[in-house]
Amino acid sequence: MINQAEFCESLRGILVARIQEGKLVIPVLPDVVVRIEKELQDPNYDINNVATLLERDLVLAAQIIQTANSAAFARTQRVESIRKAVGLLGARSLRTLLLTTISRQIYSSRTPAINDALHTLWDHSLVVAVLSQDVAGLVESAAPDAAYLAGLLHDVGQAIVGIYLLEVERSAIDRRGAHRSDFINHEFWMSVVKEVYRPVSAALAEKWNLPTAVCDAIKACDDYDPGNRRSIGNVVRFSDAVAMQMGIGLVLLDESQVNALVMIGRSLLGLDEDVVTRISAQGKRIIDEARLSART
Amino acid sequence: MAKRVLTVDDSRSMRAIISKALGTLDVEILQAEDGEKGLASVEENNPDLILLDITMPVMDGPTMLKELRGRGHKHKVILLTAESGTSVIGPLFALGFEDYIVKPFKAEELQAKVVKILNPQAKAMVEPQAPKEAPRTTESGFVGGENRPFVEVLVVDDMENVAKQFRNLLPESIRVNNALDGQSAANLCRERLYRVVVVDVEIPDVDTASLVRQLRALQPAAAFIALVMRNAKNPVQIARDKGVDGALVKPFDVEQIKDFLSAYFEAKDLVEVENELVRVSGFSGRKDRELRYFARLSKLIDEAIDKLAAACYPGAILDVTALPQIPEQAVRLLTDAAAYARDMGLGLRLVAPPETGQMFQKFVETASIPIHATVAEARAAAQEQPAA
């Protein structure tokens, strides 16, 4: 009979080693996105070429139209076709839209319970992205776009590690006939995710060739850097804490730590409490609308 | 009596910086160089607020806070420290503190937080006057402070000519600022207070949805108007989607600017309140706008009555000398105003010229409202006998 505690500890060791050696399987960007990214790097890119590339992947095209019309992206004119989306959005917005759509795909599972957890995680990532973008603009931090992407992907490692653990559990059950219900218990799952997710998030950002500012912010957003008050890392750390305070997402910290993070972040970033309250309320509305739209 | 603020910090220069930063406020500053002396000062002086450092010799901040609470003291505390680790600050929440400031800090941040904690009376007493001119620098401002100069309109559009054309269509008394990009708009909204912010919803390389959210957070009292192209299909829907209060199409036309002025500026000046007197302004617009004028007037009179009731006036005097003589609308307006005043527990008297007064006497709904020829007469009558 397998010893669960021993198994979990060996699993933790293997996972940490794999991440350190860069051997954990990280989702890759679809080929079509890589090709579009190449097109967009040319300042005079051809809208038709980009649209044609996007139209080859029907599922992605449909998801992009859906995302383009979501509350977080809402434009003046409703986007009804890929060509219109490409025409309306500039290269920067199109890149952000593509990465939002692709990232969303990571947060899904065919197991309903896991799928629900991943949806919660996605909601958290999206609200942190929106808050980071808004806060970066408010505190005159560098590039709100970079802040958005860093916010969007700061916790993606949680989803990747979570899904990896699920697959390992499945495999262990199949091979050893272990009892299914709590083979990898919740506490272990949480402790492993908490320990290793950040380098996995950073690894994904690097693998996707995101700007250095985004990769650095993801690596640095575990705690504040008082020496660089308005850094994107600090903006994401603060937005992450505000989202947790709002009760959106997986809370890996206790309440006093979350409150401390919000208070420290407000002072470091020079934000008035009322401004933070208003920004949070707007972020909450966006997530509520996104949830409503997903249900309908 | 001035509120007492105790600063507990081992650095003499830091205590001097804090004292200087709070020098503009009506507070008495007490000083202690460590937790032990801080506790002694609390016992002796009973301060209203303690500014507490974390790392100090003899007795550090967390130990002092623990000891303070252990003795049953509930003094308000702001942590003022270079320590920004959550592992240090987090556990102190259980002991209770009001706020946190990281060193080095800006004087505005300390002042704002001290003012916020030392209750509204202290706030009214100590708040500095708003500067006449906007501050030149954007670096020093604590984001969201309310000591900002007021300007009527901010136009955010990447084309300078848009603000210029808009400015030309507005009366000279309305001041207009212009921002050509999102960053300039945010800077202006940090420095000033606006009544209306007009935002082009298609600025190149700017996520206008995010920009509107940022500006709204800085200007919670302002109305937000979307600037859309004339060929846009449904400006009202666009405004709704963007979370703004209305839309203006460009190029501008005179009629929509009149509507804009009427909605955001003239309406505010239709009613003037002076003590218990509510004076109504006349109407000089186009005939087809009369109904809108009366509707706005009705709302503004109700708001004025609310204010009088809140200020405990026993009655209101409504000066309708300038009111146009349109019997149906005027009678309805006064019937509603009298009913609302009655609901709020206020009597209502009218000041009106003889011909207007005669018009109201003819209608059952308004016949019982006391009418006077002058404000002085109405005030004298109210002194003698408050209107029912």
Image: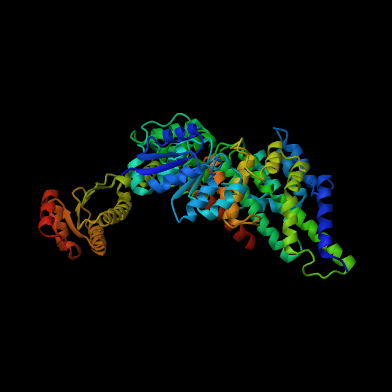
Q: Residue furthest top?
A: B136
Residue depicted at 46% across the width and 35% down the height? B15
Percent position of residue A90, x then y: 64, 39
In this rendering, position of residue A263 left or right of residue A83: left
In this view, A190 is above or below B53:
below
Indicate the position of residue B129 as horizontal and vertical percent values.
35, 37
- Left or right side of B279 for B119: right
Is the image coloured rainbow, by chain, by secondary structure, or in one colour?
Answer: rainbow
Q: Could you say where residue B297 lies in the image, as x and y percent from the top left?
A: 29, 52
Quadrant of residue A176 in the image? Answer: bottom right
From the top left corner, tell me how far across and down residue B240 is, in percent: 50, 52
Q: Residue furthest right?
A: A175
User: At x 31% / y 55%, what residue is drawn?
Assistant: B299
Instruction: Note whether A139 is above or below B371 in the view shown.
Output: above
Foreground of the two, B281 or B99: B99
Q: Residue at x 60, y 47 (%)?
A: B88
In the foreground, B139 or B53: B53
Residue B218 appears in the figure: no
Marker count (numbered): 0
Q: Identify the image quadrant of the N terminus of chain B.
A: top left
Question: Eyeballing the image, is A289 above or below A113?
Answer: above
